Image (cartoon, rainbow, N blue to C red):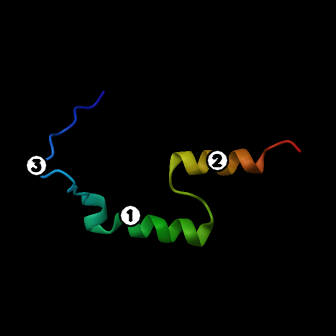
Amino acid sequence: MAKRRKKLIPGLSFSWKRALGITKVKRKIARATGIPTTRQGRRAKLGRMFRIK
């Protein structure tokens, strides 16, 4: 299990991915292609596609 860092200021968090704009790019790609970028989202989409009716 990964070690958790102690927050210096409670309620304030920092994400280097959001600061660099990676999150926004991933969201744009997901919207344009219709394929989720998260592992959980991809699994759910595949599950819906291959569900036996």
State yes or no: discs 3 and 1 in contact (Cβ < 8 Å): no
**Residue that badge 2 annotates:** 44
> How far is the residue under mark 3 from the one under mark 2?
36 Å
- Could you tell me which residue is drawn at 85 percent across and 42 percent down? 52
| 10 Å crowding of disc 2: few (<14), some (14-19), many (20+) | few
Q: Earlier in the sequence, mark 3 or mark 1?
A: 3
**Residue that badge 1 annotates:** 23
> How far is the residue under mark 3 from the one under mark 1?
24 Å
- Could you tell me which residue is drawn at 22 percent across and 54 percent down? 11
Vertical placement of residue 33 versus 41, above or below: below
Vertical placement of residue 39 versus 1, above or below: below
**Residue that badge 3 annotates:** 8
> How far is the residue under mark 2 from the one under mark 1?
20 Å
Q: In front here: 10 or 14?
A: 10
Vertical placement of residue 3 versus 43, above or below: above
In the rendered structure, the answer to whether residue 53 lies left or right of residue 49 reads right
Residue 27, percent from left and from top: 47, 67
Q: In front here: 33 or 2?
A: 2
- Could you tell me which residue is drawn at 89 percent across and 45 percent down? 53
Image-quadrant location for residue 1: top left
Query: Label 1 sits on what residue type?
Result: Thr
Image-quadrant location for residue 25: bottom left
Residue 36, percent from left and from top: 56, 57
Query: Label 2 sits on what residue type?
Result: Ala
Q: Earlier in the sequence, mark 3 or mark 2?
A: 3
